[in-house]
Amino acid sequence: MSDLYIGIDLGGTNIKVGCFDDKMNLLKKDSSPTNADMGPEVVVENIGLLTESLFKDGGYSFKNVKGVGIGTPGPVNLREGIVVAAPNLPAFRNTPIRKMVRQRLEKPVVMENDANAACFGEHVIGAGKGVDDMVFLTLGTGIGGGVISNGQVVHGYADDAAELGHIIIFPDGRLCGCGQRGCVEAYASANSTVARAIEAIRQGGKSSLSKLLDDTGKITCKQIYEAVANGDELAMNITEGTARALGLLCVNILHFSGPRRIVFAGGMIAAGDMLLKRIQYYFDKYIWPMKEESLEICFATLGEDAGIIGNAALARYNLKKGELS
Amino acid sequence: MSDLYIGIDLGGTNIKVGCFDDKMNLLKKDSSPTNADMGPEVVVENIGLLTESLFKDGGYSFKNVKGVGIGTPGPVNLREGIVVAAPNLPAFRNTPIRKMVRQRLEKPVVMENDANAACFGEHVIGAGKGVDDMVFLTLGTGIGGGVISNGQVVHGYADDAAELGHIIIFPDGRLCGCGQRGCVEAYASANSTVARAIEAIRQGGKSSLSKLLDDTGKITCKQIYEAVANGDELAMNITEGTARALGLLCVNILHFSGPRRIVFAGGMIAAGDMLLKRIQYYFDKYIWPMKEESLEICFATLGEDAGIIGNAALARYNLKKGELS
């Protein structure tokens, strides 16, 4: 029987658990609500029960599990294995999650922040496979990121590297949820794309989305991209702004860590080729003309499984380095 | 006798060579003009002669040399040991400098780009000593950079990482020498600081520097900072622009690789505390208020020796990893 690895993706809404073989084939996965407000002890017990039922249902031997990886929202202290104070896990405060999971599952555990774990998943078997220098960006409510250089996740001194959504691209620009102005997240996240569209409509812009906004009080990013597909000019201006911000971000990423590939993930990539082509357009527009760039810009391939895959792969990676405890 | 290492800093104007012991103490150094226009063969022969005279004059035994590090201007291909096409070394084009130096000195040689080498020097015995996550910035004619993450120099896929001067901070802003618009180099290098001052004066700004410009046709960055010290308002506005650009860059650097320390080097740091305090001011102004940052912003301590030190240290580092050939 192959060695097994467990990947756990602890989100604000759901816990996902996956069981993987040594080649990172997903054998079985399951999920349950996090119930984060019930506190860390209850959440960890839920993780335990979910994992046990996964192995029981799948008929896998828990004895063969060599390691566990758990990804959590940040900020985190990875050396200590602590969730410091995650906005999405309100009852968690300096919670020693790694130790708690280790005690519950009685297996060695490695911890990572969620975006880095998903990045590592894409690196190991997804859109960044075989690429030792890559950058990962999730376009969702906010914008998260991960950076891999020389095949290693870049954590930084305080485990807060790769906050790529908060790279400032327009100084003194739009206010971001983080308190800074002009962050790329304040323009190009799903939420900000919607916010900019609503502002444009409220300022008198003509759009097929106006009625929807009047009727329902809201619009979604998906609806904006549908309006683009139908030739809505306001929607096109808004999504051009999103692509421009992301193209500029790609230029800055290239000059920072020189990746071979930038991988976009998250709900917004449902916009498809339309989005990718416009990001590439703005990258080409803003990058220097000095030389042909080898950077590739593409979409992630693992979808929502990237987290459990990445966490399981990090358990394997750390075990092989002799650093899993 | 201790093992010895040679560090070579091959610049457009001068070649510097240093001989170091195993603890990276500088035993002896020397320099000579590069004469880059005479071609790579002549330059490499000069490196050989300079090195030989260094050992002869110092009474050190060349037999004890365990490795050589050479830093060159970019773009480079580090895997192949090639200077691709350095603007400062016009006769060098796909020049296999590592192999040529290895043949001339008959020692194993590692190659690095110049800014990365200086960064590594500061990391080993300078302002970044003991800091495994640091970023290095040289403020000179242009702005160069180096990034160290997890104690390793970040090269990127095409050996063009850490082009930090070409991070775009003001999209569609000032034209940079690289062809992009709004690069930090287009605002905050010594050349750009001077260019912005001259523009401001030519646009009718009142300044004590006007007469100097009229009389001599030029001003220097040093003179601008002297004018600041004397309360010249135009000069103050210009240097505030420089510090603001660098403060914004520091915010973006922090969100990218999360360094413990950002180390500024290059001719412009002669401006002293005045410059450093204003960079820190703008960093504090633009960074999110979410948490106390542990980032330190400081000046380099090795001056012009950073290159030879870093190259010698890279020879030692690669030898110990078993990767020096």
Image (cartoon, coloured by chain):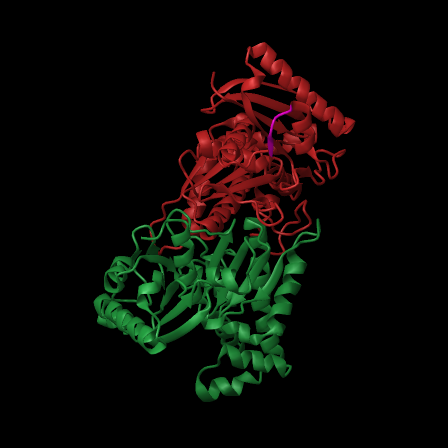
Chain colours: A green, B red
Q: Position of residue A159 (x, y in %)?
A: 38, 52
Judge whether A232 appears above or below A319 on screen: below
Question: Which quadrant holds residue B64?
Answer: top right
**In the depicted view, which residue is nearer to us: B89 or B317?**
B317
Query: Quick check: can you spot residue B139?
Result: no
Q: Which region shows up in magenta? A: B106-110
Judge whether A239 appears above or below B157 on screen: below
Q: Position of residue A58 (x, y in %)?
A: 36, 76
Judge whether A18 appears above or below B102 on screen: below
**In the depicted view, which residue is nearer to us: A244 or A95?**
A95
Task: Give the dominant element type of the magenta stretch: helix, strand or loop.
Answer: loop
Residue B109 falls inside the magenta stretch: yes
Q: Position of residue B65 (x, y in %)?
A: 55, 22
Q: Position of residue B128 (x, y in %)?
A: 44, 35
Residue B265 falls inside the magenta stretch: no
In the picture, measured across the screen, residue A28 lies left or right of residue B48, that is left
